[in-house]
Image: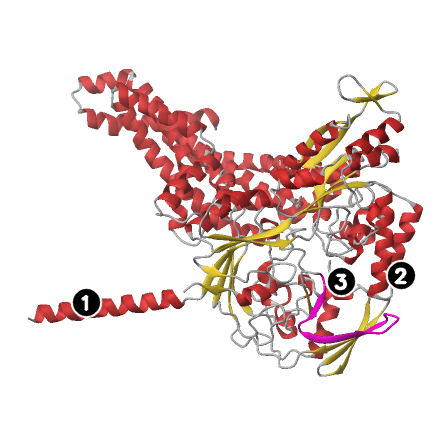
Amino acid sequence: MRYTKKKQLLSGLALLTAGLMTASAVFAQEATIAFATSELGVTSYNPVTATLLNTANSLIYDRLVVQDADQSYKPHLATSWEETPDGMAWTFNLREGVMFQDGTPFNAQSIADWIPDYRGTENEYLIDAIESVEVIDDLTVKFVMKRAEPNLLYNLASSFMGVPSAAAFDRLGENYGVSEAVGTGPFKLEEFSIGLETVLVRNDDYAWASELSENQGAAYLEKITFREIPDQSTAFLELKTGGVDVLLGVPTDFLEILEQESNVTIVEMPGLGIQYMPINVTAAPFDDILVREATVLAVDQESILNSIYKGVGAVAKNFLISSLPAANVDPALNVSYDLARANELLDQAGWAMGDDGIRMKDGEALSVKLFTQNTTGFRRLSQVVQAQLKDIGMDAVITVFDGSTIRDEYKRNAHQLAVRGYSWNNSDILDWFFSGERLGYPNVSMWKDEIGQELNDVAMTQSATSEQRIANFTAYHEYVLSQFLFAPIYQPTINIAYNSDAVTMPEVIRGVRFRAQTALDMQVVE
Amino acid sequence: MLLKYTFHRFLMLIPVSISISFVIFMIVYLLPGDPIDNLIRVGSSPEARERLTAKYGLDKPLLTQYFVWMGNMLRGDFGDAIVLRRPVADLIKQNLPYSLTLGGLAFAFSSVVGIILGTISAIVKNPIMERFFRGFILLGSTVPGFWLALLMILLFSVTLGWFPVSGAGSWQALVLPVLTIGFGGIALVARVTRVALLDVWRADFVKLLYAKGLSGRAILFKHLLPHAMLPVVTILALRIGWILGGAITVEFVFGRPGLGSLLIRALSQRDYPVVQGSLLMLALAVMLGTLIGDIAQAAMDPRVREEKS
C-alpha cells in the first residue's frame, strides 16, 4: 500500500514537471537567427568605433531616424526635424520618455555627449559636417553645421549611429561594446562570444518603436540568439533541422533548394546595390567610346535575370538601385540590351568580324581580360557575360582572384573588364566609384574627366538641400551613363528564410534591412 | 644525458623561431592586398585613407616594420588587429581554447583508436580484415575533411538527429568535429603502428622470446609494442601542430571559432597583425610538437640522444 502511494506521488510529480516543461516550451518566446555571411566577424558592439556591425547591433541601439524600403526617412528617437534653407543648421525634437537600458534617461544632452565621441575615429566622416551640438531644451537639440550636409539624415539612420548610453560609454572605455553595450533598443546584450554567438534578451520597458513596426510595445520574443555560421550549406541544414529559425542574407542561388522545404518561408526584400561590369577606360580597346558602348549594349540583363536568378530581383538599367531618386535619369540614358546596335558600333570602330567569330583590327584580335572574384555567384555571372560578349565578336578571358588580390590588380591597372557588385543605398556611391581621386580602386573604370569631376564636386559638396542634392546627383549620374563606363547587370534582392513552424514574421518587411522593426513583430508559433 | 639533449634541442629553437618570424612577416607582406581597403567605407576621403595607412605604420619601410613588430613580440605585445580592431593577443586568447579542445580531443581519439586498430590489423591474419583495413586507410587519408564533415552532418544530425549541426556551445557539438578530424588521424596512426609492429615482429629477438616460451600476449605488450612505438611517437609529435591549425575547413563547416577560423578571416581581410600572430602561434606549436617528439624518442631510445647530443 505504501509502495503504491509513493508510486502515485512520484507519477504525480512527474506529470506536474512534464506539464510545466510543456507549458514553458509553448510559451518560451525564443528564436535563433543565423547572421548573413557579410556580417560575420564583428568584434564589438560599439557603433562609434566599429568598422563592421551586424543585425544584433541594430536591436540594441535605436537611431534618431530610420529609413524605409522606399529610402524615405521616418522619425524614431527624433520625432521631427527641421533644416534651415541654407542647410547650415538642423533642429531635432526628441521623443519623450525614452530610457537607456541602464536606467539613464535619453535626452538632448545624450546627443550632445555622443556626437563628439566620433572625432578621431574611422567613423568621423559621419559627423564631419557638424560643427557643434547645442542643447536647446531637454528634448530639443540643434546641430550647427560647418557646411550644408543634405545627406545628414542618411548618416543618422546608419547602424553606426545607434545612440549609446553616455554613462556606460564613458565608464567602460575600450571595453565598451565587448563586455557591455547599452542603448535604448528593444533588446539588451546578454552575452557576446566573438565568432560564435550573441545572445540578446528583451528590454521589457521598451515603448518607443518607430512606425515601421506594428508592435509599438516591448518585443514578443524574450530572447534572441544570433549565431555565426560561415558555411551556407551548414546554415541551411541548421534551418532544416530546427537548429536555427531564421537565416538572414540567403544567396539567390540557394532559394530553389530552400523553396522545396515545406516549413521554410522566404521573404524577399529590395536589395541595396547592383551587380555590374566596370570598363577600364584607359585600357585599349576601351579607350574608344564606341567599343565601350558596344560592350555595354551586348550584356543581356533580362536573360541573366531569368537564367541565373530565375526572375528573382530586377535588371539594372543604370548605376543606382531603382528606389533612389537619382536613379530616375533621362530614359534614353538607361541601358538596354541591343545586339544589332552593338555590332554596328564595333563595325564603325573598325573592328571587323573574323572567320572564327572574333573581331580583328590592325591584325589584332578583340581579346580582353575579364576579372572577377572567387565566389560562385560572381564566377557564374562572369561566364554568362563572357558568352554574351562572344556574340559581338569579343573574346573575354576570365581570371578569378580573391577579394583582396583583385583590388591590387585594379590598382595596378591590370584589368580591362571586371564583374563585381556593391551594396550601398545612397547616390554618393557614384562619387566612390567614379571620382578621379580614387583611380584603380574603388574607381575601377579608371575614369578621370574634368566635367565629371566638376559634376561630382557639385553633387558632393555644393548641395544645400536634399532636393538640390538629388538634382545634382541625377545630373552627375546622367553624365556617367553617357560615357559608358560600366554595363549595369542586375539588382539582387535581400533574402530572408525562416522556419514557419517555429516563428512568424510580417509578410512585408519594412525598412531597408531586417532590423529592430521586424524583430519587434516576430513571434514564436504556439 | 637526456637533460643535456633537451637543453640543446631547446636552444636550437631560438634561431629557428627568429627565421620563422621573418619568413612569416615577409610572406604576409608579399601577399597582394591591403588591410586599409577593408577598413575604409563609402564616404571616407583619400586623405582619411592616408591617415589610416600612417596610423598603422604601413607607410614605413618593410624592414623597419619588421623590427618594430619583432621588438613588440619580444615584449609579448602582439599588436592590435587593423580590421578586427581588438588586441591580437585577445583574439588569440578567445580562439585558442576552442582549437585546443577540438584538436586535443581529436588527437587523443585518433591516437588511441589508431594504435588499437593498427595493432589488431597486425595481429589478425585474415585476408578480408586486411582488405577492410587497407580500404579504411585509403579512405581516411584521402577523403577531404570538409566533405566528410558534411556527410557526418547529413547522417548524424539531419537523418538521425543525434547531434547538433553546428556550433560550439555544448559537448554534443564537439562529437562530429572530433570524429571528422580524428578519422584522418586514425588511418595514419593505424598504418604506422601496423607497419612498425610487423617490422619488429620479424626481428631476431622475437624468435628468441618465442623460443624462451613466452606467451604471445606477453611478447606483444611487453616487447613488441614498446619497440614499435618509436615511429608512432614521431608521427604523433608531428601531429601536435595539427591540434591548432589542422582544423580550418572543419571549423568552417561546423561554424566553430578557433585559431584556424581566425586565420582565414584575417587572411581574407589582410589583417596583417592577426595573420602574423596566428601563424606564429601555429609555427610555435609545430616546433614544440617536434621538440616533444624528439625528447620522447630520446627518452625511449638511448641511441637517439647519444647520436644527436
Q: Distance between the residues labelled 1 and 3?
A: 64 Å
Give the secondary structure at mark 3.
Answer: helix
Q: Quadrant of the C terminus of chain A?
A: bottom left
* Residue topped by disc 2: A462
Give the image location of residue B153, x and y in percent.
Answer: 41, 42
Q: Are marks 1 and 3 in contact (CB under 8 Å)?
A: no
The answer to whether residue A300 is visible is yes
User: Horizontally, is B223 left or right of A124 in the view?
Assistant: left
Q: Nearer the viewer, residue B160 or A405?
A: B160
Q: Which of A390 and B24 is in front in this view?
A: A390
Give the image location of residue B161, x and y in percent.
Answer: 36, 47
* Residue topped by disc 1: A11
Q: Earlier in the sequence, mark 1 or mark 3?
A: 1
Residue under the image location 67 percent in, 41 percent down? A403
Q: Distance between the residues labelled 2 and 1?
A: 79 Å
Q: Residue type at mark 2?
A: Gln
Please report, as a chain letter, where disc 2 is located.
A
- Label number found at residue A126: 3
The answer to whether residue A287 is visible is no
